[in-house]
Image (cartoon, grey):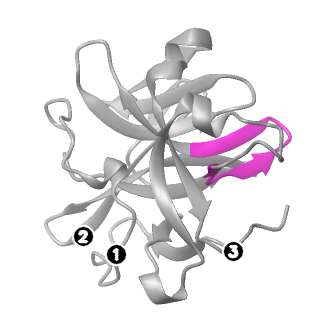
Amino acid sequence: MLNEWADIRMGDAWPTYKTIRAGDKTLNAAPGDSSEQHVALWYVHGEPVMGRIWNNNGKVAAAFGWNGKAFVDNIGSIQVLVDLPERVRGYDYHWRPWSDAAVFDKNARVFYPVHVDQVKGNISPCLLTLPNGKEALGKADIRNERASAVVAGKDERFEGPAVHKFLVLCRKPKPGQKFDE
């Protein structure tokens, strides 16, 4: 059971298929940031970076944070996480607390983070709630306890216990289904 990612480019027409929305809700976003944010994946020098796309007057706009820098222009090719129809999915998506996503014992795991495993970290979509109460979709590195998101044009970064309050996008197998690991 795999996630379905669709290739798009910044500036393309907004997709007609359903995509995974941050927290399944309209966010309390910072001024200047869209409150409708959808899960996206971008690669920088071979490194996976989770971020977000949004509908900007019918066109795809995007924001990704990487190494303390915010990328919002000239991003190029990205992937968007597609919300497949219920009848073809063997799992359901859930936005879960960090502690549910950070279960490394395969026998104890109930929720499986949507992730790209890479030598520098295990990167997953993450919904951050900032100290001021604003929300933004970004990335989580579960293995190294790091999270970041572009907020008002700046890459906001958190480490250690500060990340434990954030939500990570996970999958839970439907009854009778299981993930191959």
Q: Is residue 148 above or below residue 44?
A: above
Q: Is residue 76 visible in this depiction of the protein?
A: no
Q: Amino acid at mark 1?
A: Asp
**How busy is the neighbourhood of tag 1: few (under 14 within 10 Å), some, or many (20 plus)?**
few
User: Residue 30 appears at what percent x and percent y?
Assistant: 19, 30
Mark 1: secondary structure: loop
Counting residues from the N terminus, which is met first, the one under dot 1 or under dot 2?
A: 1
Distance from disc 3 to disc 2, alpha carbons, whole Å, reads 37 Å
User: Which residue is the site of mark 1?
Assistant: 12
Range shown magenta = 111-124
Q: Is residue 111 above or below residue 166?
A: below
Total marks shown come to 3
Counting residues from the N terminus, which is met first, the one under dot 3 or under dot 2?
A: 2
Q: Residue at x 21, y 42 (%)?
A: 27
Does residue 26 appear left or right of residue 111 in this picture? left
- Most frequent secondary structure within the magenta stretch: strand
User: Which residue is the site of mark 2?
Assistant: 59
Q: Residue at x 39, y 63 (%)?
A: 20
User: Residue 145 appears at what percent x and percent y?
Assistant: 66, 22
Rendered image quadrant of residue 91: bottom right
Q: Is residue 34 above or below residue 90?
A: above
User: Which residue is the site of mark 3?
Assistant: 177
Counting residues from the N terminus, which is met first, the one under dot 3 or under dot 1?
A: 1
**How busy is the neighbourhood of tag 2: few (under 14 within 10 Å), some, or many (20 plus)?**
some
Q: Residue at x 20, y 35 (%)?
A: 29
Verify CB contact (< 8 Å) between mark 1 and mark 2: yes
Rendered image quadrant of residue 18: bottom left
The residue closer to the viewer here, 6 or 152, is: 6
Q: Amino acid at mark 2?
A: Lys
Does residue 144 appear left or right of residue 165 in this picture? right
The residue closer to the viewer here, 130 or 45, is: 130
Verify CB contact (< 8 Å) between mark 3 and mark 2: no
